[in-house]
Amino acid sequence: MNNDEIVVEELNTLLRGTYLGIHSFEHHIQKLEDPQLKQLFQSMQQEAKLNAQKLAERIQNLNGVPADSEGVSGRMHSFMHKVMLSGETKEIIKDALKGMDRYGVEYSEELVKGDLDPVSKNIAKEVIDTNRRHADALRKLLH
């Protein structure tokens, strides 16, 4: 496996996680009743979709094939998430924050510590910075 293939695999893992986040936002949006909160979650989801697009383009530029979903285990997680998600606003925000902190920031940072080239590293950093900003916004809603 050459270095580009390793980078493609790492970026694809980040991309699958981004798709999982997009679907999680969808579950949250479906349960939210407050129009302003719904709009905030929709704008976060749009930013996640833009990040997915950037990751997919980078993977293609490295002659790789970008993931087009969250993957099998991600789909199972997504299904369970949808079933288990509370309809209470505060719980929805807590759930979104937990996912953003755990997967969007911590797991993603671990994932990209590897052998990314400078361009890929910058894109991954943008994705993580967006996730960090979303987590901060969610944290503020709880306080």
Image (cartoon, rainbow, N blue to C red):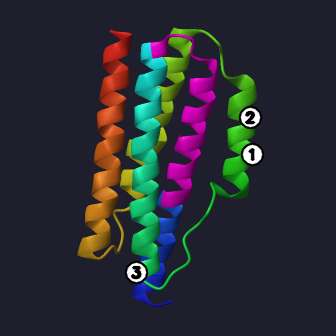
- The residue carrying mark 1 is 76
Q: CB atoms at circles 1 and 2 under 8 Å apart? A: yes
- The residue carrying mark 2 is 80
* Residue 29, picture quadrant: top right
Residue at image x 36%, y 69%? 114
Measured as percent of width and height from the top left, residue 1 is found at: 51, 89
Looking at the image, is mark 1 or mark 3 nearer the viewer? Answer: 3
What stretch of residues is rendered in magenta?
15-35
By secondary structure, the bulk of the magenta-drawn segment is best described as: helix
Looking at the image, is mark 2 or mark 3 nearer the viewer? Answer: 3
Secondary-structure class at tag 3: helix
Which class describes the residues within 10 Å of circle 3: few (<14), some (14-19), or many (20+)?
Answer: few
* Amino acid tagged 3: Asn
Secondary-structure class at tag 1: helix
* Amino acid tagged 2: Met
Report whether 50 appears left or right of 82.
left
